[in-house]
């Protein structure tokens, strides 16, 4: 989860961003947790087979110091967290709270002046090589972050205009010991943000990772301080080696580096071709919640249809799945009173259960830096028209069969607990194609053909806008993940609706990993980032405080949209520096009044197929899995 405790993940194909049985204002339902997970006593041992989620995706980074391209749920909550735990774990069982029993750190304390936080490390929490997890291991990660800011997806640069710095630039000094680390900040911050967002991204790293080559040549990154004059050079050498090793999928299971873990699991094997992998218990695990199962195999599927074939074979077949996901076309219609109603896999031995409910916003992203259509996306009326043409409720009720909830703005409306301002509620994204058409006509577009052409160039209120010339077309290409039939249906409808507003959308499908590779910012050093127009890769999964510091602030590690707005940066800064609800109201109100590079879409809740003799509690509000809570009941 990125520096604000967030994760870029697959929206609509996997519900991107954290339950109640009710209907929201747009008529979409928010499914309740099924009661079908068995509460019978646990049977010790056994091997479970779980479908990788979503189909077509798999981990591609094991070192828990990720670039913006690597920052995904598939790499973090569905892979790295099994082996390497962040200081603070957030969101177990869809609850927006810090789960102190899940990570190496105890509840922190603050100094009287609110500037220094002391993080105690659990005396019983060890690495599998026998070494204790210490304050120096935390310092190692912070040092790497400070030296390799440009290579971190968690990083947001200082914002002088908003008078705020982000981790690690907001750290004045640290004091480490075997039992704790104390961090002194440059000013007072929202303490919930520091713990549940900033420190939630910090993963202690074993000193054995402070090496510069495959021969184990010792580095100096872990022993420096944030102000060491040699920090950059010392950490550069370690980063270069560790980063290369961390994305070498062929050696994930064989490299001794990755056998040193502090989490409840260790990687047994990894198929570099398919992306499938297996985990087994870390027999040296000293934390809470030790695994019950002997092994969990994560099974890759390139399509929903292939996974469906495996599920229909039954839960008792050889190597059968204990957990899979219903394809949209074969999902039962959502029934909040009885999730088992219409279960098509009843005879195959599966119950229907709710997938994780995420603290997320779903969207497709537009590129203000696109060389072809960036100027078009920068026009607030145009992004408003794109939003007006998006029928989230229709998608939820139609191809997604009720399994979802809408994104109405920059702060998630689900689950309960997020502050929602009156202004944000009033400006909630709605389906309004009539308004979309009127906006295009009112700004100088000729809608007699599709795509419409600009007939009134200029920057006036009734003109096409800056950088748009007479005769330019209102068109762009939207890329999205392949092998998702409900998404095909939804976007085909969206294309048709947008055409009625004069907007021409060319739809193109690619694999999830291919799309992730394309999502880079437009910059002389990354010219590929100037080529893409719009991509539905995923939305954003927030951590404890749903603020967009690492997603949309100027220069943020995951701001690949070419978006920059000083007033927005200032509004974000207020949510980070203050716990006053008014800070959130101001932030949401301003965000709802401008053109963001996000076209909000529905969040999906995937119905899971769970074998009747299998207990699968422990999902989290950020799309991760916690297999240490899984077990067979018979």
Image (tube, helix red, strand yellow):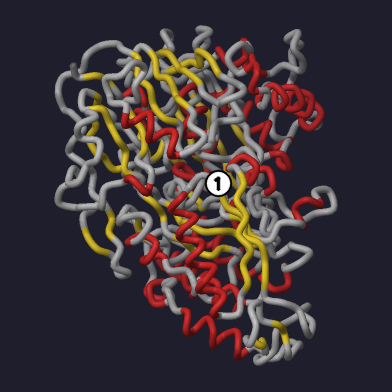
Q: Position of residue 31 (x, y in %)?
A: 26, 51
Question: Residue 566 appears in which quarter of the rendering?
Answer: bottom right
Q: Nearer the viewer, residue 612 or 327?
A: 327
Q: Secondary structure at mark 1?
A: loop
- Above-or-below relation of 102 to 317: below
| Residue 517, percent from left and from top | 68, 43
- In x, y percent, where is residue 285? 41, 13
Residue at 66% in and 45% down: 169
Residue 7 can be seen, yes or no: no
Give the percent coordinates (x, y) of residue 108. 42, 35
Q: Is residue 227 above or below residue 406?
A: above
Disc 1 target residue: 482
Image quadrant containing the C terminus: top left
Question: Tag 1: Cα neighbours inside 10 Å, few (<14), some, or many (≥20)?
Answer: some
Q: Residue 515 vs residue 75: left or right?
A: right
- The reply, left or right, for residue 235 in relation to residue 340 is right
Camera-nearest residue between 269 and 273:
273
Residue found 58% across the figure and 67% down from its top: 596
Relative placement, left or right, of 394 versus 235 is left
Q: Is residue 547 visible?
A: yes
**Residue under the point 49% across and 63% down:** 600
Given residues 349 and 33, the one toward you in this image is 349
Q: Residue at x 64, y 78 (%)?
A: 450
In the rendered image of this protein, does residue 312 appear above or below residue 206?
A: below
Q: How many marks?
A: 1
Q: Residue furthest right?
A: 524
Asked whether, in this view, residue 66 is left or right of residue 233, the answer is left
């Amino acid at each position: 989860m990125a520096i604000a405790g967030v994760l870029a993940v697959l929206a609509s194909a996997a519900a991107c961003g954290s339950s109640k049985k009710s209907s929201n204002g747009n008529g979409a339902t928010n499914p309740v947790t099924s009661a079908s997970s068995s509460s019978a006593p646990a049977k010790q041992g056994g091997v479970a087979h779980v479908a990788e989620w979503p189909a077509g995706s798999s981990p591609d980074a094991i070192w828990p110091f990720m670039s913006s391209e690597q920052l995904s749920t598939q790499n973090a909550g569905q892979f790295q967290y099994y082996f390497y735990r962040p200081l603070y774990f957030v969101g177990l069982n869809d609850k927006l709270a810090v789960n102190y029993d899940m990570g190496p750190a105890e509840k922190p304390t603050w100094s009287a002046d609110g500037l220094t936080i002391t993080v105690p490390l659990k005396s019983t929490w060890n690495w599998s090589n026998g070494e204790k997890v210490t304050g120096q291991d935390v310092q190692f990660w912070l040092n790497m972050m400070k030296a390799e800011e440009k290579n971190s997806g968690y990083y947001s640069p200082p914002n002088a205009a908003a008078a705020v710095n982000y981790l690690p630039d907001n750290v004045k000094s640290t004091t480490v010991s075997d039992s704790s680390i104390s961090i002194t900040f440059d000013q007072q911050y929202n303490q919930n943000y520091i713990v549940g967002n900033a420190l939630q991204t910090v993963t202690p790293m074993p000193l054995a990772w402070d090496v510069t080559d495959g021969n184990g040549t010792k580095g100096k990154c872990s022993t420096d301080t944030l102000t060491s004059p040699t920090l950059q050079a010392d950490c550069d050498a370690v980063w270069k080696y560790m980063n290369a090793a961390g994305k070498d999928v062929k050696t994930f299971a064989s490299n001794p580096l990755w056998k040193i873990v502090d989490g409840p699991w260790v990687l047994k094997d990894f198929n570099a071709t398919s992306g499938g992998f297996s985990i087994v218990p870390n027999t040296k695990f000293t934390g809470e919640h030790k695994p019950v199962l002997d092994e969990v195999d994560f099974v890759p599927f390139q399509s929903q249809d292939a996974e469906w074939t495996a599920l229909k074979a039954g839960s008792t077949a050889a190597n059968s799945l204990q957990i899979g996901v219903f394809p949209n076309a074969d999902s039962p219609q959502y029934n909040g009173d009885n999730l088992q109603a219409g279960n098509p896999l009843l005879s195959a031995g599966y119950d229907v259960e709710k997938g994780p409910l995420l603290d997320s916003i779903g969207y497709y992203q537009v590129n203000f830096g696109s060389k072809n259509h960036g100027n078009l996306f920068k026009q607030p009326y145009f992004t408003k028209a794109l939003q007006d043409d998006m029928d989230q409720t229709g998608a939820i009720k139609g191809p997604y069969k009720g399994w979802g909830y809408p994104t109405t703005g920059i702060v998630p409306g689900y689950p309960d607990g997020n502050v929602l301002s009156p202004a944000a509620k009033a400006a909630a994204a709605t389906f309004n194609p009539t308004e979309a058409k009127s906006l295009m006509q009112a700004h100088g577009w000729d809608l007699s053909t599709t795509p419409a052409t600009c007939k009134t160039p200029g920057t006036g209120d009734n003109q096409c806008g800056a950088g748009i010339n007479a005769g330019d077309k209102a068109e762009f290409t939207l890329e999205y993940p392949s092998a998702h039939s409900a998404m095909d249906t939804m976007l085909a409808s969206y294309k048709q609706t947008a055409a009625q507003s004069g907007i021409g959308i060319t739809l193109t499908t690619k694999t999830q990993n291919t799309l992730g590779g394309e999502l880079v910012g437009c910059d002389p050093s990354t010219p590929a980032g100037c080529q893409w127009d719009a991509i539905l890769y995923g939305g954003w999964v927030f951590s404890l405080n749903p603020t967009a510091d690492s997603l949309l602030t100027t220069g943020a590690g995951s701001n690949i949209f070419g978006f920059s707005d000083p007033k927005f940066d200032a509004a974000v800064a207020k949510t980070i520096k203050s716990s006053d609800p008014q800070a959130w109201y101001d932030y949401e109100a301003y965000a709802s009044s401008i053109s963001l590079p996000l076209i909000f879409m529905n969040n999906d809740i995937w119905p899971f197929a769970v074998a009747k003799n299998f207990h699968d509690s422990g999902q989290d509000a950020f799309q991760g899995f916690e297999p240490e809570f899984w077990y067979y009941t018979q």
